[in-house]
Amino acid sequence: MFPNIPKGTRDFSSIEMSKRNYLIQTIRKQFELFGFYSIETPSFEKISTLVGKYGEEGDLLIFKLLHSGNFLKNRILDFLTEIKNDKKIVNISKCLTEYMSDKALRYDLTVPFVRYVVMHRNEIIFPFKRYQIQPVWRADKPQKGRFREFYQCDADIMSFSWSLWEEIELIQLCDEIFTKLNFPIIIYINHRDILGGLVEMAGIENSLWKDFTTSLDKWNKIGRNLVKKEMLNKGISSKSFDQMAFFFDMEENFYNKKKHLTIALQNSEKGKKGIQDLSFIYKNITNISLQKTKLEWNLSLARGMNYYTGTILEIVPFNNKSSISIGGGGRYDQLANLFGMNNISGVGISLGLDRIYLAMEQENFFQTISSYPSKVLFINFGNEEVLYAYKIIKFLRKKGISTQLYPNADKIGKQFRYANANNIPFAISIGKNEIKKNKIRMKNIQKRTEKEYDNINDVVNQLTKKL
């Protein structure tokens, strides 16, 4: 049987990994420049840690892990015995799940981070700024840009003293990252309190809040009409929808949107606070200025996760506004409450490494990124020659130049073909003649030019030049 991999997962070639590593290194460097510290959490958590934090749709996409070995066998036997003896059990599926599993692969990095903070609160200095670059898993339907295993790059701040400067720092952080990647972006911004004010204005019951935000979050994905149909099916009236839709359709600049909303939400304390928060962010971002980023107020942005409470953000490529998002985030001031830690607020951004990669491939932004595994290949003429060449190999590696030695004294043509097939740009030949003359012969494989050098430092200078 021919081997295969599960749907929604991928293998990565060495060329793909060099590009992915370039992204990770760029993002990590900016995270650290902004004062974020690295942590890691386990790939799986207790189900109780994850369930109930993402909303009903999110909970359904959590990958649950079965108990292993005889433990699972015994649990199934216990379950069958309980079913037989207790006729009152109604939700057999739920009970079976609890018997078979109490762990799950992490769905995102935010909830495990908050769990980490609660567990280690006596060791942490607040405000706590952490970053994490790790894979997450979702039992989603695989499609373009949507995978079951993918990497997230998160930067979050948890603090006992709430400040909108944290949001401004995160926007600046994103701008720096995508400026380094030479990748123009739009950051859509909104506020959950403004949405709460619109819900109050439209007379929608509080019990429909989660249904409202889940549906609204699809506005740019499925369109106005399908969102309306979904909201009506969930019990939101056509009149209420039409009252709010005016604002979601509005294509005005920030100040005109603010003017309309200030009038509409004049009786909503919640709505007025949201407007005030966004006004503070806009005013100060304008004074600080952005490089490769456009900040745009998108009133239909809802972010479907249950845990968001204030400012919310979504990142898309500038050249393709309809593109799937490549990042997002926001403020979550009550998430730690679910773990028994009160009065601490959190805010963060999450960048989707895989979606950034795909978007940059589509725009040919990787053209200037070197994708060779090594810079130079040493041709193998035999044991005596290799032993002589090894002092040069070690010197180049100490200088940070990736260097390979071909393992066998095969035909010279075969060794050069290996270098060419692996996109290695230079080959160094040190045979008996070179040893005798104390020379270093180097070939530029792409240009098919060859030169002899007397000094190893001249070789280093040539190898460190940009191709």
Image: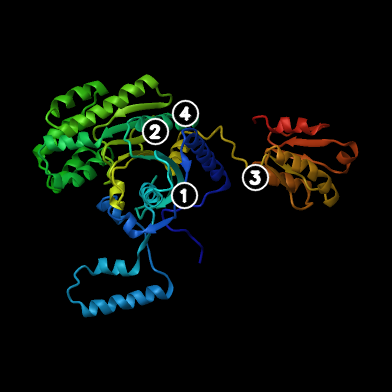
Work out whether residue 124 can be spotted.
yes
- Circles 2 and 1 in contact, beta carbons < 8 Å: no
The quadrant the C terminus occupies is top right
Tell me which amino acid carries mark 4: Thr
Residue that carries the numbered disc 2 in the rendered image: 170
Task: Give the CA distance from mark 3 to mark 2.
Answer: 39 Å
Local packing at callout 1 (Cα closer than 10 Å; few below 14, some 14-19, many 20+) is some
Residue that carries the numbered disc 1 in the rendered image: 40
Residue 326, how many percent across, how many down? 39, 39
Task: Give the CA distance from mark 2 to mark 1.
Answer: 20 Å
> Residue extending furthest right?
436
Residue that carries the numbered disc 3 in the rendered image: 422
Residue that carries the numbered disc 4 in the rendered image: 179
Q: Hey, which quadrant is residue 64 in on the image?
A: bottom left
Task: Give the CA distance from mark 3 to mark 4.
Answer: 30 Å
Local packing at callout 4 (Cα closer than 10 Å; few below 14, some 14-19, many 20+) is some
